[in-house]
Image (spheres, rainbow, N blue to C red):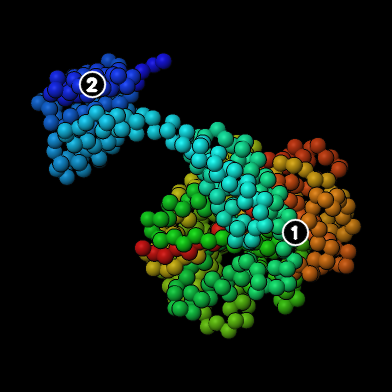
Amino acid sequence: MRKDKILWADDEIDLLKPHILFLEEKGYEVTPVISGQDAIDSCREQTFDIIFLDENMPGLTGLETLSTIKEIAPTVPVVMVTKSEEESIMNQAIGNKIADYLIKPVNPNQLFLSIKKNLHKDDIITSATTVSYQQEFGRIGMQIGDSLTADDWMEIYKKIVYWELELEENQVQMQDMLIMQKREANNAFGKFIKKNYLDWIRYPDQRPLMSPDLFKKKVFPLLDEEEKVFFILIDNFRFDQWRVVKNLLSSFFTVDEEMYYSILPTATQYARNAIFSGLMPAQIEEMFPELWVDEESEEGKNVNEAPLIGSLIERYRKPYTFSYNKVHETKYGEKLLSSMDNLTRHPLNVVVLNFVDMLSHARTESKMIRELAGNEAAYRSLTRSWFRHSTTYRLFQKMKEMGYKVLLTTDHGTIRVQNPVKVIGDRNTSTNLRYKLGRHLTYNPKEVFAMTRPRDYGLPEGSITDNFIFCYEDKFFAYPNNYNYYVNYYRDTFQHGGISMEEMLIPFISLQPK
């Protein structure tokens, strides 16, 4: 087995013989040198795993040596060892990206700890993460089997997302366990929704926070307290995607993280219109028929968002003016950025960002995007990259400068589908893969959540024979005709509209400028 190789440069290296012997007993190979130049020459001749560098040596100083070593071996961690506690030296060393900074006299255990931190940290973290998740796996499994409340399910999903990101970051090979647990959780979550959803619609005062409740319970109270608010909705923005962009905003804002439940279908036409109207879709159709667009219509399903917001403000007799902007691509983002100062006259500014939804759909249709976002981790990474390098990041910076409170949310999430469910419908049946609306639908009732009386669930009824059916877990609808082609094309794509934690348990984030 190869030994880790250490280079140690110190003009008093003879006095450090006991330390070197200690490290050699621990299984390390130590090369001692007495000057900065000797250290540089050694780095040119061979490769080291870590370098200990005395700051105060005759000839080349430690800092001068460090600069040259970084050119020769930029990835090798360098630990500065010095008698000096001067801040300027520390700053220069840190500026040159040292791995650690030790003050003389050092004891062997300090050296050993620094080596472990820099050479073996990943292995130690991987091992600890594996043990921790194995323990948490059992606890989560026991919770899933209990009678859980709506709040309990939010906490379960937060835990699953946390471990998903931890396992990913630390490259722990336990993805199969996590996938199995997520599938088990989604199965139980589907049963929970089936049991409780109708009551949530019938008794809105007793339900968890849902799409139609956001403005009434979260936006209006802030405006009533004379807060200035930006309401930012990123279409199709999952909780795990929020978690990977969270640290990009934490330097600008203090973060208060919540969740809420999307209504069914977890699709833009229904969920987002419910948010902006404060109504269930059936109520929108009844009260504002001119603002509701049916499934069969070729007209865009979210063209009336600004009028719906206006109707909501008027219905609650609020005196607030607002702006509404939708950003489809960079040029619209740049246009919005240039006009931000003009928005200060409004206490409420609403912005819809469509990139994540566009990414989700593009992944289905584009082989290249599917390669780039080949799995959940890559999908999250692309989301983070977009957030950091698009106008979106600058929008948040500007909102912070303006002193506005920011409410960041979404209308629904999305799930990576794997398992087909057969359904038969006529040509007027809706095309969504996670839910179907149509007449005389044929399906296995054990495989779907069926709403045979849609209006009871707050959904419009086109005719007396119209039904809604929804997929659970990671399933998607496929027609028997051309079945194999259909399945192969859509399997492993990101879809929404149905019942899963990823689609229904979605972020609601309050950001207060620092």
- Quadrant placement of the C terminus: bottom left
Q: Nearer the viewer, mark 1 or mark 2?
A: 2
The percent position of residue 267, horizontal first and vertical second, equals: 68, 58
The percent position of residue 90, horizontal first and vertical second, equals: 20, 41
Quadrant in the picture for residue 113: top left
Q: Residue at x 52, y 59 (%)?
A: 332
100 over 255 or under it: above or below: above
The percent position of residue 378, horizontal first and vertical second, equals: 55, 40
Q: Residue at x 58, y 78 (%)?
A: 313
- The amino acid on which the numbered mark 1 sits, given as a three-letter code, is Lys
Q: Which residue is mark 2?
A: 20
167 vs 431, nearest the viewer? 167
**Helix, strand or loop at mark 1:** helix
251 over 90 or under it: above or below: below
Q: Which residue is mark 1?
A: 194
**Going by the image, does 25 lie left or right of 89?**
right
CA distance for labels 1 and 2: 66 Å
Quadrant in the picture for residue 306: bottom right
